[in-house]
Image (cartoon, coloured by chain):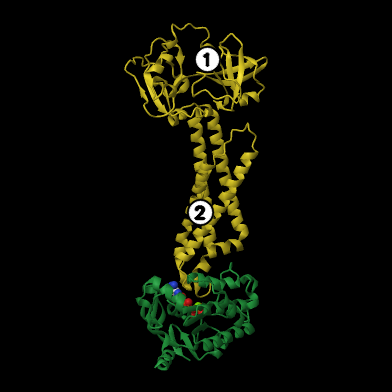
Chain colours: A yellow, B green
Amino acid sequence: MFLALKEMRYSKWRYALVMGVIFLVSYMVFMMSGLATGLSSGHKKAIDDWNASSVVLTEDANKVFGASQLTRGDLDRVSTASSSDKSGVGLYQGSVTKGSTKENISLFGSDASAFTTPAVTQGTNYSGKYDITISQNLVDEGFAIGDTVRIGNLDHDLTITGIFKSTTYSVVPVIYTSLDTWTSIKYGTQPFNEDASKPLNAVVIRGTSGVTIDNSTATRQSATAERTGSTAKLQKLDMATFVNNVPGVSAEALTFNGMIGLLVVITAAIVGIFMYVITLQKTAIFGVMKAEGVRTGFIARSVVAQSFVVGVASVAIAYLLAWLSSLAFPAAMPFVADLGKWALYGVLLVVVTVVGGLFSVRTVARVDPITAMGEE
Amino acid sequence: MAAMINAKDANMPVLTLSKVTKTFGSGHTEVDALKGVDFSVSRGEFVSVIGPSGSGKSTFLTIAGGLQSPTSGVVSLDGADLGALSDAKRTRLRFEKIGFVLQRSNLVPYLKVGEQFALVDKVAKRGVRSSNIDELLTSLDIAALKDKYPRDLSGGERQRVAIGRALFNDPSLILADEPTASLDSDHAYAVVKLLAKLTREQGKATVMVTHDERMAQWSDRIYRMEDGSLSVK
Ligand SMILES: Nc1ncnc2c1ncn2[C@@H]1O[C@H](COP(=O)(O)OP(=O)(O)OP(=O)(O)O)[C@@H](O)[C@H]1O
Ligand SMILES: [Mg+2]
């Protein structure tokens, strides 16, 4: 440490330069991670809001929420510890119109009393046949309690009765309404023989105990939507799997993780090359030190300590500045400062800088003390 | 009894080389850099080795300092046979028993003068002995340089600091390889005189290699190296 710090003090600019580069790379890693989390949250936040443990879809939907077609009758085939631990949910993706204002939205149908239905922060929850609640971010687009709006195939005005906290699905604001209203919005006035044959997209489950699925009556294997009878084969997915199959989420995660991985490797390379060049410039004095009986380990440790100090300092500054930047970003920006994840990336970046420094240890070990004697 | 042991210690050579040879290369590129060198130096002795370029002076000094092994012969330092030691032990022995003063300044460019000494304490894994450092700097009349970097010192000042650092760990042996090569004659004289004085005062054994015969005038003995053979002048 002694040699490491003294040398950094002496060659300030040289070390400031490498710290600047690592700072920028780390800052970029944190930004990317923030965007990745923000964007993925934009795709699926409404689902995270459920705080559910698993989701049941039809098997032929291949884990895709929107492609899953089951019926309210299928609810009985899913058993949970308490009947309030399951909730049938429908999804409709389209737009909401108020006069000349038109906004893309994701609309969920869910029983007013079900755990999947978000609590309102203003107004009241939906209760009447043509009631809906909207997310706060839709308010920002000019919608308010008491407004009447039109959605989808339903040939009737809907009334906004309440507002719940901001959330998104498929990167657009969210509306909730009852299952019946959702059915009419999505399917219009199609006749259904009985309630049990009315459609659902998923059964959402909270808690893990006593969850079973009855597939004994399942006959339907193909995706041909046959809305009479409970015959689709059901499949239970944990939330991670379910969310990963929300369109856009995994592809984006892959892209961002790829970029972050690349940046981490670049950091290792920068530090490795830099420390190597600096070490080469110091071989003469290392030779002298070794001649004087300074152990190779002492010198090597100082090289590694330097990359550690450089790494910790620049990553910490990047962490702090990235966090401060995130506070300054506009709310509309899809950015989430996941500080725990950043800390993890930060540790990884520091580890990688130390690994970069380790490359130079071999060079230090190879310096022959005999070079200290005689003329250069 | 105690006096006897001390007297015996005083006469016991610090460094001895007996029948040391060094051959580089093999076949028709073979060079005999040292051809059977016998040498010894005791405490309080200041010895110079002079000789023309390529005669083997540096080779002699590196072997004496345990930086390379002789092809044959025995080198012993304070009674320890260097050839019998492991690399790690030899490194330790160099640190504890030998002070080097090199032609090229052996100061660490990025340490201030005071820190050059602190480094020795750090390597020895002991606390930095600030009072010792100050005392030594004052005795060498370089206390004012304590907070300067080597690049801000004159050549003479740099060698004085180097001598101070060589002595700082209280070694038995000082090996100086052309310590005055980069100095003008006035400063060179001053540096050699200082080295000679400290050698006697502190009871060190000092071997100085030089090709400037004038620098040898303060020596107790002068050896001449000629084509790999060492003889007393
Ligand atoms: N590592 C080596 N490999 C091959 N030959 C060497 C090696 N080191 C020294 N020699 C040869 O050994 C001989 C003695 O070299 P040495 O460096 O000891 O001379 P010197 O007396 O110190 O010369 P100078 O006054 O120029 O410093 C020279 O012929 C030199 O070429
Ligand atoms: Mg030489």
Please report the residue visible at 62 percent of the width from the left and 26 percent of the height from the top: A137
Q: Is residue A251 above or below residue A345?
A: above
Q: Is residue B97 above or below residue A47?
A: below
Give the labeled residue for mark 2.
Answer: A272
Is A72 in front, or is B136?
A72
Q: Cα distance, mark 1 to mark 2?
A: 59 Å
In what element is the residue under mark 1?
Answer: helix
Chain containing the residue with disc 2? A
B84 displayed left or right of A369: left
Residue A157 placement: quadrant: top right
Q: Residues within 10 Å of mark 2 (few under 14, many from 20)?
A: many
B227 displayed left or right of A170: left
Precedes in sequence: disc 1 or disc 2: 1
Going by the numbered disc 2, the residue's amino acid type is Gly
What is the quadrant of the N terminus of chain B in the image? bottom left
Q: Which label lies toward us, 1 or 2?
A: 1
In what element is the residue under mark 2?
Answer: helix
Residue B106 seen by the camera: no
Going by the numbered disc 1, the residue's amino acid type is Trp
